[in-house]
Image (cartoon, rainbow, N blue to C red):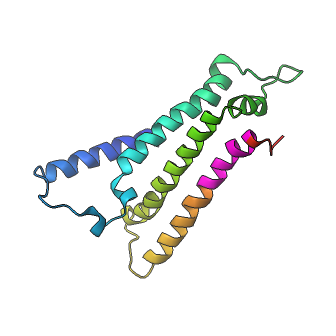
Amino acid sequence: GLIMHMVQSLVLTIQNRKARPVKYEVHNGAANSKWYSRSMGLLGTLLLFFLIIHLAHFWVKSRITGLPGEDANGHENLYAVMQEVFKNIWVVIVYVLGCISLAYHLMHGFQSSFQTLGLNHKKYNPLIRTIGFWFSIIISLVFAAMPITMYLGIVK
């Protein structure tokens, strides 16, 4: 799904550029859309880099190279890996920035997905925007809470 999402966004971007090969002389994007709606390519690229870092920290260690943290019985211990990874403030900052990028990406993507499915109606759009906003914030805060609480020693 992720790969299809990336390919589809690239195809759509190319189609949009071909549809209007000459750029507007005066462009005021803020008049019709939020900055994060116009920055989906940048936010998506940041999320891709974040995902690569995340997979390198956890999935690759767990599935390919073996975990640096094992319990006394030799079983994988992802908690030990999280303790190791999230003791570095720079890693925590990268994770939090990744979660901020996720929030903005979801703010546009949630509402946009309803429009793509043809569920765009002026009566329901305010509700969709509100739910999408809070969904984006809550999901991103929950994801950001893990590295922050591990770094601060709240989770032991």
Region rendered in magenta: 140-151
Task: Measuring from the top left, give residue 136's x and y in whole percent.
Answer: 55, 59
Which residue sits furthest top?
65
- Front-most of 115 and 127? 127
Specify whether 17 is left or right of 137. left
40 is higher (above) or lower (below) than 120: above
Q: Quadrant of the C terminus?
A: top right
Q: Picture quarter containing residue 111?
A: bottom left
Q: Toward which corner of the image does residue 97 lie, by quadrant?
A: top right
The answer to whether residue 6 is magenta is no
**Rendered view: 96 above or below 72:** below
Q: Is residue 104 left or right of residue 61?
A: left
Q: Is residue 128 above or below residue 43?
A: below
**In terms of depth relative to the viewer, which is nearer, 4 or 68?**
68
Tally the marks. Answer: 0
Residue at the spot x=68%, y=49% of the render? 145
At a point 58% along the width and 60% down the height, the residue shown is: 137
Most extreme residue toward the right is 72
Residue 148 coordinates in the image, percent (x, y) = 69, 45
Q: Residue at x 51, y 32 (%)?
A: 52
Membership of 142 in magenta stretch: yes
Q: Position of residue 32 (x, y in %)?
A: 29, 68
* Residue furthest to the bottom: 123
- Name the spot of residue 153 as percent of width and height, x first: 79, 41
Q: Main secondary structure of the magenta part?
A: helix
Residue drawn at point x = 38 percent, y = 72 percent:
120
Task: Please indicate whether residue 82 sits to the left or right of residue 115 in the image.
Answer: right
